[in-house]
Image: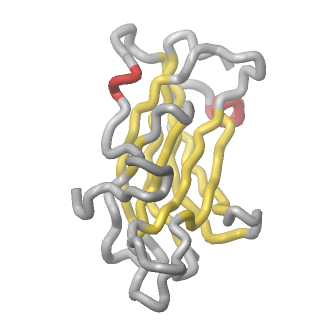
Amino acid sequence: MSSGGREVEVTISSAKDIKNVNWRNGPNKLYAVVWVDPKYKSSTRVDEDGDTCPTWNETFVIPLPPANDEDDDKVYINIVHAGGEKNTKPLIGSAHLSLRDVIDDVGFDIPAVKTLKLKRPSGRPHGKLDVTVTVRESPESCALATYGNAAYGKSEYGYAPEKGS
């Protein structure tokens, strides 16, 4: 899919049926990380109270990178535990969505409400993620600087965004 000045708006609503990977230390403290281009990742705030059913209701506008040979951009979302407890793996689950599928289903400028299956790194299912995705033409002034919220720190899952921010 050639970007040609396009962007994708992603609203990460909530997740459900998440196993408590932190059961020895308390509830899950989850946040979501979203990206199209892995060089530019954005994250939601940490849901301190949601545990196995977190809610974020946060929207991100992501400029699409220039066209590539495969011509099929995807939105990737990881659900991550913010705590640094010993023996607790931070990556809860991952999901992705083809933007070509969104365009084929609803077209441009029309929100597509989706429930994505989250998978653990092993490939086993691990809950569901509710998102709304809209692909649209972006204004000429749209630049990669519009990526919002906290990004990863020193190591991919060694940093969590500030809680409650």
Task: Name the image quarter holding residue 99.
Answer: top right
x then y, percent, for residue 82: 40, 66
Q: Residue at x 37, y 52 (%)?
A: 44
Q: Residue at x 53, y 72 (%)?
A: 16
x then y, percent, for residue 145: 34, 24
Which of 28/159 is in front? Answer: 159
x then y, percent, for residue 97: 65, 43
Q: Residue at x 76, y 63 (%)?
A: 123
x then y, percent, for residue 63: 46, 24
Can you say whether 125 is above or below 73 in the image? below
Q: State left or right for residue 105 relative to residue 88.
A: right
Which of 52/145 is in front? Answer: 145
Can you say whether 122 is above or below 53 in the image? above
Which of 12/104 is in front? Answer: 12
Can you say whether 114 is above or below 119 in the image? above
- Image color mode: secondary structure
In which quadrant is the N terminus drawn? top right
Q: For the image shown, how many numbered marks are present on the structure?
A: 0
Q: State left or right for residue 39 relative to residue 127.
A: left
Q: Residue at x 50, y 12 (%)?
A: 5
Q: Residue furthest left?
A: 165
Q: Residue furthest bottom?
A: 24
In which quadrant is the C terminus drawn? bottom left
Q: State left or right for residue 1 relative to residue 91.
A: right
Q: State left or right for residue 144 relative to residue 114.
A: left
